[in-house]
Image: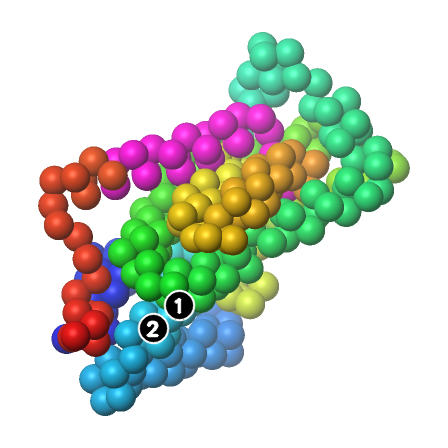
Amino acid sequence: MSVFNFPGRAAWFLLAITGATAYTALLALGIRIEPERLALTFALIAIFLAASFFYLSIRPDRRLAVVTAATAFMLAFAGTTGVLTYPAAATSAATRDGMFMAFERFIGVDWRALVDAMTASSAVNTGLTLAYLSSLPQIPLTILVLGFVGRDDRLATYLSLLPATLICTILLFALAPAFGPIPSYGIEGELYERLGPGGKAFLPDFLALRQGHFASFDLGKMEGVVTFPSFHCVLAVLTAWALAPVRWVGAPAILLNGIVVVSTVPVGGHYIADIVAGLAIGLASLAIRAKLLSRIAVGPPMIAPVLR
C-alpha cells in the first residue's frame, strides 16, 4: 500500500501536474521563486507522508494514517494548485468589472448600499470578518473531524474536490479577471475602512502581475488574487457538505459556512456574480461526484489493511 492512495492517486497526480505548470509558468514570466517557504512546505509534506507511512505500515493506526496523509495533501494543494492563480492573473485578458457591475444593475443590487448596510454595525461586521477568516482554517479542522470519526470516504471526496474545483475557478478567472467592486465602484473614506481585506490586499499583486512588474513569488505571502468566481464560496459548499453528517458539528458547520458566503460581499470584496459562480462550482462538483459514485465503488484503499 502507498500513502498516495489517499485521497487517491489521481488527486495526487493532479497536484503534481498543476504544481509543475504553476512554477514553470512563473519562471517563464521571469518571476523569481523565493525558496525558503517553498522548501519548508515541501519538507512538512514529506514529514506528514512519512508519518502516514509509519501509521499505515509499521504501527497501524487507521485514524492517524488518514489524518497525516490528508494533512500532507492539504499542504501540497496549497503549494501547487493554489500557486497556479498567480500566472493565471498575468494573462492579458480584458477585465470584466463592467460586465459584473451590469449584472448587479440587472438584478437590482446596489453594491455600495448593500455593503454600507451590512457593515453599519461594528458587531455584525466583526462577526462577518471572523466567519470569512475561518474559511481556510476550516480545512484542517475538517480533516481532523472526519479523520477521527472514521468518515474516510467523505474526507477523500472532500480533499479530491479541492484541486478540481480550484482548477475550474482558475480557468474562469483567467477568462474573466476583475479588479473587484471596491476600486470599480470607487469606494473610499469611512466605508472603505469598514470593508474587509479580501477586496483590497490582492490588488498590488494583481496589478503587478498584469503589468509584468511582479518580480518574486513567496509562497508564504501568497494572496488570493481570484475575484471571479469566489473560491471562498466553493469552499463553503464543500466544507458544509463534508461536515454535515457529523453529529454536533454538522449543523454549526452549515450555519458558519452560510455566514461565510454572506461575508464574501463586504469582507471578501466580491461581486454578486462571483458568489453565484462560486456556489455553482461547489454544488456542481458535488452533483457530478455523486453521479460518478453511483456507478463505481469508491473507497480509500490505503486504509483497508488498517481496518482489519
The residue identified by callout 2 is: 63
Q: Quadrant of residue 289?
A: top left
Foreground: 45 or 1?
1
Q: Amino acid at mark 1?
A: Phe
* Tag 2–tag 1 contact (CB < 8 Å): yes
Count neighbours of disc 2 (C-alpha within 10 A) and say few if under 14, some if 14 to 19, many if 20 or more. many
The quadrant in which the C terminus is found is: bottom left
Foreground: 148 or 3?
148
Helix, strand or loop at mark 1: helix
- Residue 180 - label: none
Q: Residue at x 33, y 59 (%)?
A: 151
Determine whether, in the image, residue 12 is placed left or right of residue 87: left
Q: Amino acid at mark 2?
A: Arg
The residue identified by callout 1 is: 148
Image position, residue 263 (x, y; %): 65, 39
Foreground: 220 or 247?
247
What residue span does the magenta drawing correspond to? 268-289
* Principal secondary structure, stretch drawn in magenta: helix
Q: Counting residues from the N terminus, which is met first, the one under dot 2 or under dot 1? A: 2
Was residue 283 drawn as part of the magenta stretch in this picture? yes
Query: Which residue, as the protein is rendered here, is positioned at the far front?
Result: 247
